[in-house]
Amino acid sequence: MFGEVRSALDVLETVARGLDPSCLDGRDAAALVELAARGKRICAAIETLAVRRVEETKVWRDGGHRSAGHWLADTTGETVGAAARTLETGRALDGLPETDAAFRAGELSETQAHEITGAAGADPGAERDLLHVARERGVKGLRDECRRTRASAVADDQAWARRLHANRRPHRWTDPDGTYRADVRLAPDAGARFDAALENHLRRIFAAARKAGRREPRDAYAADALVALAGEGPCKPVEVRLDLDARAARNGYVSPGERCEIPGIGPVPATTARSMLDDALVSILVKDGADITTVTKATRTIPARLRRALEARYPVCGVRGCDNDQFLEIDHVVPVADGGPTGIHNTWRLCPHHHKLKTLSGWKVVGVPGDWDLVPP
């Protein structure tokens, strides 16, 4: 086995040393990247499986390391946190045979394997569905689904809510170049209020900059918004949106297949959701509430009720495989100029990139309402 691995590495090293990317056309370069990516995934699987044995045999002690994670970090040149995630994945693979097989076959990246083992460890019955999500969607989509799986598997909803609240804390430091840095942990309801207040300032500052003819990266304006929020407080009433199933609200916990989320934040404990229901500044979409599919009007104006329905139906970009949930834009499948109505069956939400492909590059919408997709011309 070791001879085969060393021979394979020798071949790869020879290829890497002699590689001149300028000699490749675009398609050959793309094909080489795909091969290299598969090789990286397979090597990650070998590393993850082997380091599990290093941990079990405690051979890491021979070099005087504090833990198997510290040994792996020194061996790979990664951080101790990354090494700890690798060890967590290796431990969890023992009870997840389908994930183990997919990882060994190079079908999963180390990141995907870590996400699936963490979620399927909480709910083993979800393993096959999560593997399907990993094949069909990007890492962000998989992470979103894994969060929902973990939320549905929580045994004590109230304890989960208390734990999220208890773990709140800010971490502040200064970089060597003098830059002030901060990392904040908040419970999801508090985080949603903070995020909404920050977004209001960001939109105000962005609009003022455009009006004055200034153009800077959006992240720069977000930093200005953070300072404004700290110094001035909210610039307008803060609205938080909550999507939940009525059954979860009544029962006080989330069952598999039920939804209890703050859009843009993710799943929240039903206990947290129920405590938010009395807040007049929380906009609520209840799954079995009013009929939201009957709003139609031939105008570009998007009624508030339709907007909420679309946000619930398309929490991420409507194009298959795209899980972008930032700056989504409402699009008419059949343009208003061509007689398309403004209703739930003729509208969806797209990220700016895919909206431009449809509007400017001739990409076409295919599918049926609620299951649209975008294809090249």
Image (tube, helix red, strand yellow):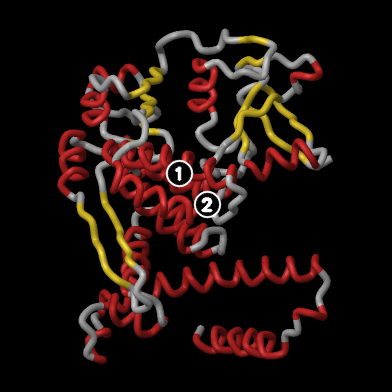
Q: Is residue 187 above or below residue 19?
A: above
Q: Residues within 10 Å of mark 1 (few under 14, many from 20)?
A: many
**Image spot of residue 56 (x, y percent):** 26, 74
Asked whether disc 1 touches disc 2, contact meaning CB atoms under 8 Å apart, the reply is yes
Residue bearing the label numbered 1: 202
Q: Earlier in the sequence, mark 1 or mark 2?
A: 1
Residue kind at label 1, given as amino acid type: Leu
For the point 61% across and 24% down, the residue is: 370
For the point 44% across and 9% down, the residue is: 290
Residue bearing the label numbered 2: 218
Q: Is residue 87 above or below residue 256?
A: below
Q: Is residue 60 above or below residue 226?
A: below
Residue kind at label 2, given as amino acid type: Arg
In this image, 223 relative to 193: left or right? right
**Image spot of residue 147 (x, y percent):** 37, 43
In this image, 59 relative to 18: left or right? left
- Could you tell me if residue 52 is visible in this image? no
**Image spot of residue 114 (x, y percent):** 40, 58
The residues bearing labels 1 and 2 have C-alpha atoms spaced at a distance of 8 Å
Q: Is residue 308 above or below residue 174?
A: above
- Secondary structure state at the residue bearing disc 1: helix
User: Which quarter of the rendered picture does the C terminus lie within?
Assistant: top right
The one nearer the camera, 308 or 201, is 201
The one nearer the camera, 249 or 150, is 249
